[in-house]
Amino acid sequence: MQRISHDCILAEEAFQKIKRPVQVTSQRASPLRFADPKVQALWRALLRFQLLPTGFCNHHLRQHFPSLLGQLPNSLTQGQMTYHLRRLRLHGIVEPIPHTHRYRITDLGLATAWFCTPTYSPILRPGLGSLLPELSPPNSSLRRTFDKLDQEVTAWIQHAKLAA
């Protein structure tokens, strides 16, 4: 008998909490949607600052974030970066360092960035792209496997309909 070593319900709850809008006291923040290019760029930018002992500030994030979106450095205004920092703060991804204008990445933020960054770009995006008939070559092994799965599920449904 196998034993499940993790709680999928709690993991799903944590994932849903990040990707939903949040309200802390009277402040609201928009969701951090997994597939949003700006959110993916935020995760990658935060990973650059994880080892800074004094944290990072709006200016540091503003220097690195636009290039991850394919834009020129400093192409975003200070107000736009403040908006993103506020979202990250209200979602518990970063926390302000008291008596400064600097932030540090929380344990939740670091774990989220470490998980979301390597799974989206190299795995999900190309994987989903290889499944779409109009985007993928028909000889892709992943595409052939999913086509076979689709055929088997369709056959099973047809068999179930005949039996009913």
Image (tube, rainbow, N blue to C red):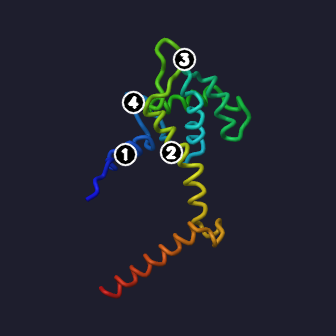
Callout 2: helix, strand or loop?
loop
Q: Is residue 149 above or below residue 83?
A: below
Separation (CA) of disc 4 from disc 3: 26 Å
Location of residue 92 by image quarter = top left
Callout 3: helix, strand or loop?
loop
Residue type at numbered disc 3: Thr
Mark 4 vs 1: CB contact within 8 A: no
**Which residue occupies 45% across, 78% down?**
152
Location of residue 64 by image quarter = top right
Residue type at numbered disc 4: Val
Separation (CA) of disc 2 from disc 1: 16 Å
Mark 2 vs 1: CB contact within 8 A: no
Separation (CA) of disc 3 from disc 2: 28 Å
Residue type at numbered disc 2: Arg
Q: Which residue is mark 4?
A: 24
Q: Which residue is mark 1?
A: 11
Q: Earlier in the sequence, mark 4 or mark 2?
A: 4
Closer to the camera, 56 or 21? 56
Query: What is the quadrant of the C terminus in the image?
Result: bottom left
Separation (CA) of disc 3 from disc 1: 31 Å
Residue 116, percent from left and from top = 51, 44
Query: Which circle, 4 or 3, is nearer the viewer?
Result: 3
Mark 4 vs 2: CB contact within 8 A: no
